Every structure is written in C-alpha cells, then in structure tokens.
Amino acid sequence: MATVKPKPAAKTERSTWLLTAPALVLLTVAATGPLFIMLIYSFLEPGQYGNVVWKFSTKAWFNVILQRDIFDGTLTWADAHLTILWRSVKLAMTTTVFAVLVGFPTAWFIATRTPRMRLFMLFLITIPFWTNLLIRTFAINQIIRNEGVLNSFLLWIGVIDAPIQIIYSDFAVFLGMTYVYLPLMVLPLYAAIDRFDMRLLEAAYDLYANRWQALRRVVLPIVKPGLIAGSILVFIPALGAYVTPRILGGGRNMMIGNFIDLQFGQGRNWPLGAALSVILLIFVTSMLILYVRFVNRSTDNG
Amino acid sequence: MNVNSQPDIRSEAIAVDVDRVSKIFGGEPPVTALDDVSVAIRQNEFFTLLGPSGCGKTTLLRLIAGFEPPTSGSLRLGGRDISRLPPNKRPINTVFQNYALFPHMSVAANIAFGLQMLGKPKAEVRDTVDEMLKLVQMEALKNRRTSEISGGQQQRVALARALAPHPEVLLLDEPLSALDYKLRKEMQIELKRLQGETGITFIFVTHDQEEALTMSDRIAVMNAGKILQVGPPREIYNRPVNRFVADFIGETNFLTGTAQGDAVRISSGHMIAVPLDGRTGDVTLTVRPEQVRLCPVDQDGALHAEISDLVYFGTDTHCHLALKDGTQIVARLQSLPTGEVGYMRGQAVGLRFEPGAVQVVGA
Ligand SMILES: Nc1ncnc2c1ncn2[C@@H]1O[C@H](COP(=O)(O)OP(=O)(O)OP(=O)(O)O)[C@@H](O)[C@H]1O
Ligand SMILES: [Mg+2]
C-alpha cells in the first residue's frame, strides 16, 4: 500500500463537527446569549417603568454591595442583600442534604426491587412532574395550612386542641422544597445504584467491612456520579426557587429568587436584578466546583 | 452416603463441619438448593466441590461464607458454631467467580481492604500488601486500577485480596473458569503452590472434573443438592459409588447384566467376574476406557467384539467396539508413532478388562 490516501480519521472528525454544528450553535446561543444580556443589563440604568435605559452605569453593582441612606446620604453595607443570599444558600443546602438523606434510601430501595416493581415505583416518583409546580405547591398548602387536611385530622383524632402553625414557617418552606426537588435527587441516584454491582457489597462484607464501612468505602465512591448529579439538580434550582418560598413561607422571609423577581417587577430596577442574577450565577458555579472537589477528595482512597 | 475409606479421619483436625445443612429458596415453586448435606473439611486441605451446573456448589460456599443463612442444619468452624455469624465476623474469605474487585481502587488498595477493615496498623497493612503482591507476582502493577488489568491478573489480585487477611478458610468459586486453557493450567499449579505455602484450608468449586482430579486432596461430588461421594481423587475415579459419579468423572463404559453367583452375565451373554458384595438381580457395571485391552479373538476369556470406529485424539485413539448384542464399549489405545494403532474398522477382535477394573455401580 504505497499510495497515500487522505487520512480517514481526519475526514470523520470533520464530518462529526459538521453534523454537531447546528446543535452546538443552538446550545451556545441559547445558553450563553441570555447570560450575556444579563451581564450587559447589569451595567445600564433602570428605566422609570421597568426596562432599561441604554446608558452605561455601575450603579447597580454599587447597589448590590452598598446602600445610600435616603435621609442623610451615608453609605452602609447592603447587608439586607447578604442576609437574603445567605438565607437562600442555607435553604438550598438543607434541601440538598435532606434530599440526599431521604433520596438515597429511596433510590436504594427502588433499585433492589424486582424489575416490575422498580418500573412502577419510578413511575410513582415521576408523577409529580405531570402537574404544574404552582399547583403542587398549593396542594401542600391545602394540606398543612391551619384549616388544612393535616390539622383537621389531628384535631379530629384529638392529638391536638388547636391547629399547629406549620404553614408560613421556615419549616413549611423546607418541607415544600424537599418535596418538590426530591425526584431530581432520586432519579440520578437510582440510575447509579442500578448499575452498582451488588456482589461488590458481598465482597466488602466478606473482607470484614461492617455496613457503614461498606457504604462509605465501596457504595458511595461508586455511586458518586449519581450523587453529584442529583445534588447539582437539586441545589441549583433550590437556590433560585421563588414559588415555593412565597406560597408556603408567606413571603415573610424573602429568598434571593423572590428578591430578583421583585427587581424585575414592582421594584422596577432591572439592572439591580441583573447584577444580583450574575452574582447568583457566580456563586452557584463556585459552590459546585467546591462541592465536586470535596466529594472527590472525601471518597477517593485509590 | 459419605463414603470415606480414610481410616484416620477422626485423628485429623476438622476446619469446616457442615452438619445436615439444607437450603430452600422460597419462591414459586421453592428450590431445594441443598438437601441435608453433611461434610467435614479438614484443616489444611485442598477440598473440591465438583458437580454439574445448578447442583448447589455456589450455594454451599455462600452458606459457609455467611451470605445466606441455612434453612436447617448447622455450620461449625474449628468446632465453633458459625451458623448465625454475619460474613464480616467469619475468618473466611472468598475468591468470587467474577472476582468482584473494587473498580474504584488500585490493585494495592484492593489487597489492603480486608486488613484495613480489621483495623491493622498502617505499617503492617503495607508490609502484608507487599508480601501478597510478591506472592502473586503483581508488584509491577500495584498502582493500576483493577479495570485496567487482564483477566488473569484480576484473578491473581482477587486471590491476593482474599489471602491477605490470612483467613482460616479460603473459598474459591470457579476462579479459573474465565481463563483460557493455558493460563488455567498455570493458575492451577500456582493455586496448589499458594495453598501449600500459606497452609490455609481451600474449598474450591469447579465443574471441571480434570481440574478437580489434578488439584484436590479430596473431592466431594455433588448432584441436585446432595453430596454423593467424598474421597481422594483416585478413589473417586476408581471406586465411584454410583452411576452418576462414574459418569461425571472422566469417561466410562456402562454394562448392564444380571448377578449370577459371584459373576455377572452381561446383556451380550458374556460372564464377568466382579466383587458383588451380596448384590443380586440386575446390576450395572462400569469400566474405564483405559482399562479395556484388545487381544486376539481366540484368547482365553476374551469377549468377542467388532471395531465400529476409531477416533484419533493425539496421544491416544478411542476404539469404539460393539459386542454381539450391540452393546458399545470404548477402549482407549495408545497411538503408535505412525498415528495408527494397528487395528482397522470392521475388524473382529477380542477384548478383556484389567483385573479389578470392573466396578458395580448399582442396579
Ligand atoms: N437466590 C436464589 N433464589 C432462588 N433460587 C436460587 C438462588 N440461588 C440459587 N438458586 C437455585 O439453587 C440451585 C443451586 O444453585 P447454585 O448457584 O448453588 O448452583 P451451582 O452448583 O453453583 O451451579 P453453577 O455451576 O452453574 O454455578 C439452582 O437450581 C439455582 O437455580
Ligand atoms: Mg456456581
């Protein structure tokens, strides 16, 4: 074979790129386009009735960090923003942790059933997705509010004399959030556990590991990708959530999602909303990087 | 049913004592995987469980390891009842059929696992791991991931991992079945060497009768959840207790006939003298192909037969013989340097059996 032919590898590579180009273009535009617009808006001035005025300004960014007192004009830290952000992070983290604590046993249970049972249970897990988030949240509201199903039942069987105040508490928000985001944790965890070779567990027991050691040294490191995927899927939307906190928390404790929502609505300060969104984005990204690093380190013992 | 001609069985220390163990898996219909099995495995012995697929070999190993509880009966290790002990509390390790190596760990980390779980000090773990790596000749690959080594290498890592905590008993579930012929032969020798060097009791599962014969101190032949015969390889091969054992181990000929005094009249009408142990009526005889000799037709006491086929196997040639009534007998003849055996198809020959070669294996 002395004749030189065009390298087939190069050719297939070129056609691969060509074939994926439409998808890549769409993804690039759709994923980065809106972010880019956000970034630009954050450097503009707010219009009087919402929208933006096309004039460069760093006021929005300034306002994120500092606030000017309306009476004496002194500058103070905008600690309200920090409080809101911190409250949202706390909520998103507890939701994620709780989703792992509840989701892992659930996923394990499903993955160890018979194939038919597994399908049925996965089906049950996905049912909530069929209904709008708003409606589901109102349904929870109906259950836990003072005249709701839960309190009526407890009153009726005589466990309590007066309704317990569940709705419009931090607990209610946390409960609702866990309920809403749990499937997003269970599904990737299930996929990972389903691929897990149960014989490895027997090997671990055989080599003197107790249940906890087997879980930590063998199961968790192997299902780690599912754990990370689930955590990301829960944490990100939980951080920006605003429907659930508003309906179940009664809007008393504002979350960053509600606050940003406010800027684009009644607040009529789009640049500030945009700046806060960008900050949230940066925050989420760095949290995720830290988390993935942490999980990798704590389960790596190769 | 446990035939054991060894007179010194009581004087030898027993490692694992399986006492009337049954295992029934629930379900529709329930499966009796082990049916009232009793066997005593001696310390320091290379003990093999041999039997066809589905006879309960893996189930017996899993019961000894502790992965499944027995439905009835008890298991003792060195005289101590371990029936209710979880697997992580039993000084028994397993080499799994599929190896079950931890895919997220290196070769060395896999071997260290058991020692770490036992809470051994770091220095000791490191030394033992090095020692094990040397034992299975895997030092060069100790930092590789287990998914990045060959099947034979994985097999050796699985072995090292199970040996590292120095268990009292090592269970091996068909560890060689995934290897090619040549590697399997090598590993058979290596396993024997390791067993000798470590002094650990090996319980080895296989459905390869040749492997069982070459490696074992004693073999238990199983079928349908029962142990049919326990004994050293020579005894199992030459004195099978029943037709199943005779058929499963090696190749053999069966002859049917009727007991007449201290001889048997086989279906072709010939009389064959065998020790009958008081048996009467219809009996089945067995004789190994290598114990069948060809001789001149007119030789005294020879059975008359015709050669129906000659099949060349390299070192030897299988000579298929038909008796007068059509009964088939195979004789194994050593091939001559020319590749022939000096007989032709269709030739009339006489045949006789080596003294003591014919056994009664039941009705
Ligand atoms: N978990 C289980 N549930 C139900 N039946 C089982 C279970 N495990 C094994 N069995 C049945 O028990 C019998 C013995 O199985 P076992 O795995 O011990 O056979 P084996 O001798 O190891 O066979 P092989 O050589 O094919 O590995 C089989 O009929 C099998 O179908
Ligand atoms: Mg088996």
Image: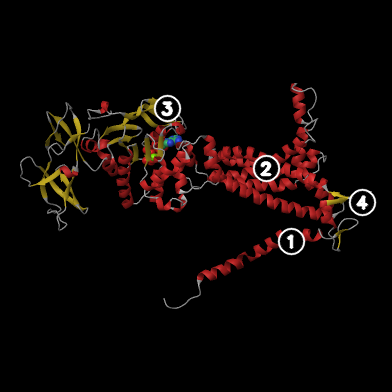
The CA distance from mark 3 to mark 4 is 81 Å
Q: Sequence-wise, which precedes: disc 4 or disc 2?
A: 4
- What amino acid is labelled 4 in the image? Gly
Dot 1 falls on a residue whose secondary structure is helix
Chain on which label 4 sits: A
Image-based side of B339 in relation to A155, left or right: left
Amino acid found under the numbered disc labelled 1:
Gly
**Regarding mark 3 in the picture, which secondary structure is present there?**
loop
The residue lying furthest to the top in this view is A158
Q: Residues within 10 Å of mark 4 (few under 14, many from 20)?
A: few
**Tags 2 and 1 both on a single chain:** yes
Q: Which residue is label 2 attached to?
A: A96
Q: Are marks 1 and 3 on the same chain?
A: no
From the image, state whether disc 4 or disc 1 is nearer to you: 4
Indicate the chain on which mark 2 is placed.
Answer: A
Chain of the residue under the numbered disc 3 shown in the image: B
Q: Secondary structure at mark 2?
A: helix
At label 2, counting other C-alpha atoms closer than 10 Å, the crowd grade (few under 14, some 14-19, many 20 or more) is many
- The residue positioned farthest toward the right in the image shown: A71
Residue B72 appears in which quarter of the rendering? top left
